[in-house]
Image (cartoon, rainbow, N blue to C red):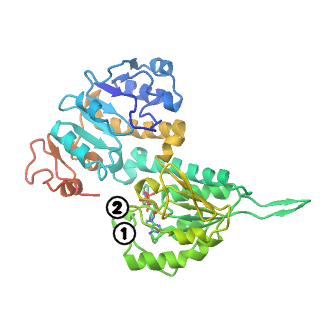
């Protein structure tokens, strides 16, 4: 079958869903790969390298394509060029994109979302949320180190001792743990906090000191965090305040799936930081963990510079694309057999990440958000079971 890789049109998106290495992998699986010229430029990949890997370079790669690969969801113009029955595979943050979901359903597209790959062991090679969080966590640490006009590590010199920087990381999922590990490698003293029960051990295993606020843990479904009540949020902020005030650099990464990011740090807490302090908020795109943060900008709050991350993995397009494209290749391998598109909708991973198919929204949680029914109960025309929400 023909697989298309088009230039990303979303403003600021520099990543690409296939690299020459994964194109070669797709060709080995028996597929024809059509790449739009310039698709890899943002990630510093020349068209020639795609051609050498066996891709066709086509200005209209969607013509005749059965599967379209992307990082961001296609825009309206791109979507309108697809025939009913075409499958798309990209991130599809559907809580922000319900209109997009409806358009896909109505256009008869089969949409697979990398955001919805179930976090089970077998799906680890396909887990793009993790691979991109890893990039974002690393980037957060080096941004904090670069913006802080102080040493991160201890230095003993003839002219005296330079003390290590104090760094606080809030949220210790994939991004937070990677930020901790990176900051630690630069020599700073790191503290970390997360609401999940397992987090303290994970923070300690990275060489950081877990902060104990004396509060209950907040475990939600599937190992994720639960949303805080207003009382709990206020108490958490009150108890975090002295740790924030003592930090030279604060990195926040907290998220709750399907919800606005929790506000962990109020403006007054940042104002209590020393002049010259740095705050890096990776959750800025989803509302921010820090009150007053603006995605894609640096704002001064008191004497602290607050950096709001916006599509942070796209700031390291080459490694982010390599990892993402490898995730995508693993998914395509699952969705195809002997060169044909053959998704097994009984497979937990396929069912989890399929959002629209045959004119219906197939994910129960999203169907509920849309106020419509998911796949009808009872026998399905193509034998597809109803999937569980994540
Ligand atoms: P995420 O991006 O959803 O959230 C980031 C972190 O913010 C989480 O650790 C969460 O607990 C934390 N958080 C939420 N509210 C908070 C608050 N009020 N205060 C402080 N911290 C708060 O998380 P993620 O990186 O996607 O990881 C979520 C879970 O999934 C973790 O348990 C992780 O180990 C697990 N995971 C499993 C797999 C797998 O099995 N394949 C892969 C990746 C992650």
Q: Is residue 365 rendered to the left or right of residue 114?
A: left
Circle 1 packing at 10 Å, graded few (<14), some (14-19), many (20+), is some
Q: Quadrant of residue 234?
A: bottom left
Label 1 beta carbon less than 8 Å to ligand 1: yes
Q: Looking at the image, is 296 positioned above or below residue 22?
A: below
Q: Residue at x 41, y 58 (%)?
A: 287
Q: Regarding mark 2 in the picture, which secondary structure is present there?
A: loop
Image coordinates for residue 172, horizontal then vertical, percent: 51, 63
Whether residue 114 is visible here, answered yes or no, is yes
Outermost residue on the bottom side: it is: 214
Q: Label 1 to label 2, Cα distance in Å?
A: 8 Å
Q: Looking at the image, is 209 positioned above or below residue 44?
A: below
Viewer-proximal residue, 139 or 85? 139
Q: Which residue is mark 1?
A: 227
* Labelled disc at residue 259: 2
Circle 2 packing at 10 Å, graded few (<14), some (14-19), many (20+), is few
Q: Is residue 291 rendered to the left or right of residue 276?
A: left
> Which quarter shows the C terminus?
bottom left
Asked whether the beta carbons under mark 1 and mark 2 sit within 8 Å of each other, the answer is yes
Q: Residue at x 45, y 50 (%)?
A: 130
Q: Residue at x 32, y 27 (%)?
A: 3
Q: Looking at the image, is 284 positioned above or below residue 50?
A: below
């Amino acid at each position: 079958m023909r697989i298309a890789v088009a230039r990303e049109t979303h403003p600021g998106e520099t990543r690409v869903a296939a690299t020459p290495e994964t194109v070669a992998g797709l060709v080995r699986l028996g597929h024809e790969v059509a790449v739009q010229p310039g698709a890899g430029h943002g990630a510093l990949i020349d068209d020639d390298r795609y051609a050498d890997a066996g891709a066709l370079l086509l200005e209209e790669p969607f013509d005749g394509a059965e599967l379209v690969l992307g990082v961001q969801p296609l825009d309206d113009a791109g979507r309108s060029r697809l025939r009913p029955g075409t499958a798309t595979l990209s991130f599809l943050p559907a809580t922000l994109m319900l209109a997009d979901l409806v358009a896909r359903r109505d256009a008869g597209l089969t949409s697979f979302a990398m955001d919805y790959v179930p976090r089970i062991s077998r799906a680890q090679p396909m887990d793009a949320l993790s691979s991109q969080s890893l990039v974002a966590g690393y980037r957060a640490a080096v941004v904090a180190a670069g913006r802080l006009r102080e040493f991160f590590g201890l230095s003993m010199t003839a002219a005296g001792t330079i003390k290590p920087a104090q760094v606080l990381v809030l949220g210790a999922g994939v991004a937070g743990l990677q930020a901790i590990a990176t900051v630690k490698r630069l020599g700073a003293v790191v503290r970390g906090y997360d609401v999940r029960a397992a987090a303290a051990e994970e923070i300690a295993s990275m060489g950081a000191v877990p902060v104990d606020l004396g509060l209950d843990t907040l475990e939600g479904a599937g190992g994720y965090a639960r949303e805080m009540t207003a009382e709990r949020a206020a108490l958490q902020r009150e108890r975090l305040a002295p740790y924030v005030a003592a930090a030279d650099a604060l990195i926040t990464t907290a998220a709750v799936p399907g919800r606005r990011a929790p506000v962990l740090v109020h403006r007054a807490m940042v104002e209590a930081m020393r002049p010259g302090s740095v705050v890096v908020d990776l959750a800025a795109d989803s509302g921010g963990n820090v009150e007053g943060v603006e995605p894609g900008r640096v704002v001064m709050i008191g004497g602290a510079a607050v950096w709001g991350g916006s599509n942070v993995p796209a700031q390291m397009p080459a490694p982010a694309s390599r990892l993402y494209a490898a995730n995508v290749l693993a998914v395509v391998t699952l969705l195809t057999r002997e060169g044909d598109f053959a998704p097994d909708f009984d497979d937990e991973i396929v069912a989890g990440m399929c959002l629209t198919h045959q004119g219906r929204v197939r994910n129960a949680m999203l169907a509920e958000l849309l106020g419509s029914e998911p796949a009808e109960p009872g026998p399905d025309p193509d034998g597809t079971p109803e999937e569980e929400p994540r």
